[in-house]
Amino acid sequence: MQEQKRLDYDKAFETLIKDGTIYRPPKDAIFDFVDAVLDRSVKCWDLLEQSYAVGEANMVLLSVLYNNFKQVLQVQSCKSTDISKSTGLTGWQIMNAKKHLNNYSNGELVSGMRLLQEIETGIKTGKIEDEFSVQYFLCNFL
């Protein structure tokens, strides 16, 4: 008689969630997506898909990316001991930016911001398809 493998209930539940048998609704992942991009993590692609699954607009994603790139650049390049006074950023913004310091050089951050501006202008003028704008950024920047 062949012996059957038995899974405990927790392992069985995890397996069913992982393989998609049990549906898990997508969560809003925009800030996780931005964090992944700022950390140079390949997870950004999965998080982008999750953002799309909840209906996040490309222009919103690009705008949040730009603002976070700018904040990281401001904190990373600030020579003052009073970062808030020098940059105008709140304590919360500074704390979030500090999580991503030195993952990119200041020049890379500026290049990313320029590319994001070009993409936004391209969308508005019809030179870049909105549908592929965030993927275009990731492919050209990462």
Image: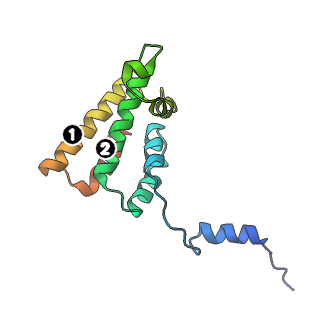
Coordinates of residue 83 in the picture (x, y in percent): 44, 20
Q: Position of residue 19 (x, y in %)?
A: 59, 70
Q: Residue at x 76, y 72 (%)?
A: 9
Instruction: Give the answer, above or below, for where 118 lies relative to 75.
Output: below
Q: Residue at x 52, y 32 (%)?
A: 99
> Residue 4: x, y in percent?
81, 79
- The correct choice, above or below, for 82 with respect to 135 in the image is above
**Residue nearer the viewer, 70 or 8:** 70
Q: Of the residues tagged 2 and 1, which is closer to the observer?
A: 2
CA gap between label 2 and label 1 equals 12 Å
Which quadrant holds the C terminus? top left
- Location of residue 7 (image quadrant): bottom right
Viewer-proximal residue among 107 and 62 = 62
Crowd tier of the residue under label 2, counting other residues whose Cα lies within 10 Å: few below 14, some 14–19, many 20 or above: some
Residue at 31% from the left image edge and 45% from the top image edge: 62
Left or right for 122, reference 134: left
Do the numbered discs 2 and 1 sit on residues whose CB atoms are within 8 Å? no
Q: Which residue is mark 2?
A: 63
Q: Quadrant of the N terminus?
A: bottom right
Residue 23: x percent and y percent?
55, 72
The furthest residue to the right: 1
Q: Is residue 48 above or below residue 73?
A: below
Q: Amino acid at mark 1?
A: Glu
Q: Give the farthest residue toward the bottom.
A: 1
Residue 108: image quadrant is: top left
Q: Which mark is residue 118?
A: 1
